[in-house]
Amino acid sequence: MLDDPALNPQQRYAVAHIGSPLLVLAGAGSGKTRVITQKIAHLISEYGMNARNIAAVTFTNKAAREMKARIGRLIDSKHARALTISTFHALGLSLLRRDYHRLGYRHGFSILDAQDCETLLRELTQKFPQQLDLSDLRWRISNWKNAVQSPDIAQTTAADNVAATCAQLYARYQRQLLAYNALDFDDLIVQPTNLLRLFPEVREYWQNKIHHLLIDEYQDTNACQYSLMKLLLGVGNGLTVVGDDDQTVYAWRGARPENIGLLTQDFPRLKVIKLEQNYRSSNRILQTANGLITNNSHLFDKRLWSNQGLGEHLRILACKNADHEAQRIASDILKLHFRNQDHYGNYAILYRSNHQSRPLEKALREHHIPYKLSGSTSFFERAEVKDVLAYLRLLTNPDDDPAFLRIVNTPRRHIGASTLEKLGNYAARRQTSLFHASSEFGLSKQLAEHSRLRLARFIDWLQETARQSTVQHPAVIAQRVIEETHFREWLLETSRNRKAAEKRIKNVNELLNWISRLALQQDESTGIDQLVTHLSLLGIIDRNSEQQSDDAVHLMTLHAAKGLEFSSVWIAGMEEGLLPHRNNLESTLLEEERRLAYVGITRAQRNLTFSYVAHRSHFKEQIDCEPSRFLKELPQEHVVWEEATSNPTSPQARETGKAHLSNIKALLTG
DNA sequence: AATTATAACATTTTT
DNA sequence: TGTTATAATT
């Protein structure tokens, strides 16, 4: 995006508007982040608002980081530091930090990741007579939370037997979390909402603190986030939300595009501004995007345009299979890179689901094209990283049973299943945590001498280290844990080969770096407990921030691409069953798939290429594929279909094919 | 109790 | 396809 062009009239209006809630309907590439950052600057400099009274909320850590960086270039650094710019979840966490005790949580609470939650649910369902689908249960609970429905409500409104059982399990799950002194991700929104709803003095504090609230990607808010927003706002505080209903791609996670419509009802004085001028893409790309998205139903009409000229045709590549597709894309990239003499960082390959990255990676490696994969198994999901974090969690929250179970025998302490079973039963009877039960006398009578000693040694060590952790620097504690557990040695022993071990040790070292760095960043009052919750929230981190100078092709899912732009984009796997995904073929879900394609298209500045395959291997079997219906919905005057072989069928295709060939020849011959 | 072998299962998107 | 849960070994 251009760095400092004057704002266009709509943008200027949105920045200057004050005195009533504002909804900015910002199409892709219309400069919405600029509007938010400029508005913050404007509130401070023109309106005299104190930076500490302004909060901007994003959905991803990446977006928050980016916004911080951009606002940092606009305003004085002491103002910038006072601003609150965070994700919804991090904001929720700061509400909880002040008042967790009011909801029955204790100091040092933990945040459980999805895996911990699933393990807990599995345990709860195993005690249950009925056979239940675990992922269905998890999905239901998350939905209840996102819709602000307590276990009680869920139980009374359950429509059928299965729902009633799930609601019952939801209640147990919630009780268990409280016993663990732990929250899941959804709780980071739900519980702050409860705080504001139940305690007038909490509400007053936050409504007095936040005078203006700005929300980015507003179309992604779910019902719970919406109620958090309203509670924070109270009456009289300023609100600016920026969103694009055509870019809702998280409805499956409870996002409610209708929340945009809800605003007009709940805030009668709402002002609506549309940003339709696009500063990113060629008009051919925009017209293609517009043409596709008109197949969806709309609350507000919107048509993107730009003054960047018509641009090149969009291409559609027909391929035999995924490997062939990857090969074609890779050689395509090579050609373009050779022709343009630009950076690989300008290129991106987008796809519907993560597993599509495999053949693409392979082809790129074969062509010696550097690439950067974002959003796969993230750093914080690595087992060794989670192990170390579990140690730190347990040190600040002894009741964190999931953390206890994770590390009690990692590295091996010869504390096995039978010991843990006795411990678990004992703790359950006494209504206490595994950690506390471990040192109780009643339990030790049930254990064999050697088991008792091993457990006692572990507990003694934990208690000693926990005592240290109240006075020592968090980085020192983490370092100490790793050394005293011989964690690195254990990694060396248990990894299959030297290389894998080195990689895992490197991850551990990197985590230590993170901890030192974060501990430095925050003020000296920051304890290990805050550090750990912070790290848990960073779950999906892209470490690209450190290595963004990398001249590498970006590989990512369409979801992960939202908010980004590239001069050339390939969208792979444009097939029925994949982009519209086979599970999402009914009306509202299908519209979301279409929006996903729309998001992909609007990432491109100059070149856009789709590809689809005739056969794709699905598990063991090969399935026949058809081109995505979305390809047929594109305005055909802007696209060129290219066949797989060197005898292209359409005249345009033959032309471009020839053009490419002669270009390459010209380049090769100098 | 730990290691290894076999089966089973999963691929939608993520804070 | 590759990982991951359970079973069967040692």
Image (spheres, coloured by chain):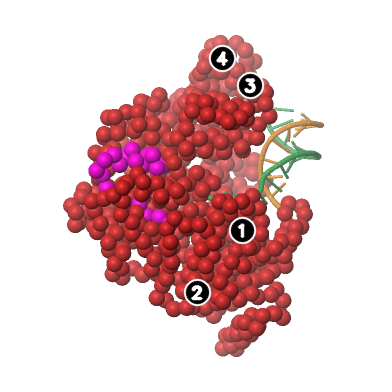
Chain colours: A red, B green, C orange
Question: What distance separates the C-alpha of mark 2 from that of mark 4?
Answer: 68 Å
Based on the picture, tell me whether residue A230 belongs to the magenta stretch. Answer: yes
The answer to whether the residue labelled 1 contacts the one labelled 3, judged by CB atoms less than 8 Å apart, is: no
Sequence-first disc among 1 and 4: 4
Disc 2, SS: helix
Say which residue label 3 marks: A421
* Quarter placement of the C terminus of chain A: bottom right
Q: Which mark is residue A284?
A: 2
**Which chain is indicated by disc 4?**
A
**Which chain is indicated by disc 2?**
A
Say which residue label 1 marks: A579
Disc 1, SS: loop
State the image coordinates of residue A616 (x, y, percent, origin top left).
72, 60
Give the residue type at disc 1.
Leu
Question: What distance separates the C-alpha of mark 3 from that of mark 4?
Answer: 12 Å
Q: Is residue A404 visible?
A: no
